[in-house]
Image: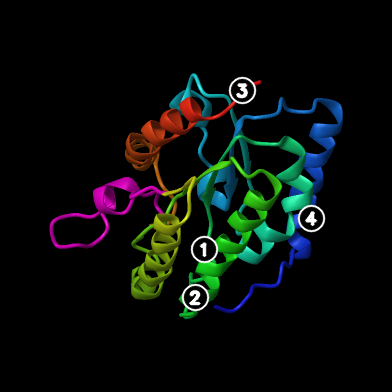
């Protein structure tokens, strides 16, 4: 498979710098569950409650693509020494007419391999690119990227694929309109409740496996 070049868009710099400034004042405790990715992570306002009692750190930044999340590894991943990483990105990679599923998948796979090279025992959970009303026309490309990552997770110790797709589809296989905000793209409270039902048990299970000392 091809490799993805890490690249941070200038318009994200303020968000990343704000995280760094916050960390300079109060550095988060190590070995938490780090949630990182695009706006679906950033907008998860009930994350701490939903994952309790596991301590979590939200480092989502809106509009991000997989090369950008890879690019900030040194700045807002490595300093936290997370024991668990929950990742959601790729939605914006394939958000329009782009159908390069392989690159979207490799953006995550390279990120996960970098995390494993840094912390061999890290537990990682991949949230697949979500089917949405706004981007349904490109779902085939998104689904293919998810399948590539799912295969990677099946072949990689400590890497897990969270099937948040199935419970967000209705009987005819299309996205459930009731789980989205008015833009048809971002999740509402009901949508996050569905995600929590899938992801929370996986985070708790991962937390039981990691060394907290």
- Tell me the CA gap for discs 3 and 1: 30 Å
Q: Which residue is mark 4?
A: 13
Between disc 3 and disc 1, whose residue precedes? 1
Residue at 39% x, 42% y is 188
CB of mark 1 within 8 Å of CB of mark 4?
Answer: no
| Marks 1, 4: nearer the viewer | 1
Judge by depth and name the residue closer to the eye, 30 or 213.
213
Q: Which residue is mark 3?
A: 212
| Marks 1, 2: nearer the viewer | 2
Q: Is residue 175 magenta?
A: yes
Element on which disc 4 rests: helix
- Tell me the CA gap for discs 1 and 2: 11 Å
| Marks 2, 3: nearer the viewer | 3
Residue 102 is marked as 2
CB of mark 2 within 8 Å of CB of mark 3?
Answer: no
Residue 90 is marked as 1
Q: So how many labels did they put on this image? A: 4
């Amino acid at each position: 498979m091809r490799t993805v070049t890490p690249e941070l868009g200038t318009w994200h710099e303020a968000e990343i710098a704000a995280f760094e400034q916050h960390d300079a004042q109060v550095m988060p405790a190590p070995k938490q569950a780090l949630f990182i990715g695009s706006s679906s992570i950033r907008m998860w306002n009930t994350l701490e409650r939903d994952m309790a009692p596991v301590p979590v750190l939200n480092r989502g930044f809106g509009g991000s693509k997989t090369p950008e999340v890879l690019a900030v590894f040194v700045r807002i991943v490595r300093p936290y020494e997370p024991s668990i990483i929950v990742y959601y990105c790729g939605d914006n990679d394939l958000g329009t007419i782009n159908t390069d599923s392989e690159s979207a998948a490799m953006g995550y796979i390279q990120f996960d391999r970098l995390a494993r090279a840094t912390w061999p025992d890290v537990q990682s959970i991949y949230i697949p690119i979500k089917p949405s009303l706004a981007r349904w026309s490109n779902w085939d490309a998104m689904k293919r990227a998810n399948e590539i990552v799912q295969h990677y997770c099946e072949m990689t110790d400590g890497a897990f694929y969270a099937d948040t797709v199935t419970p967000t589809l209705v009987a005819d296989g299309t996205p459930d309109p009731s789980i989205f905000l008015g833009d048809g793209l971002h999740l509402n409270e009901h949508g996050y409740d569905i995600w929590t039902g899938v992801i929370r048990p996986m985070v708790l299970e991962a937390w039981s496996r990691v060394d907290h000392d």
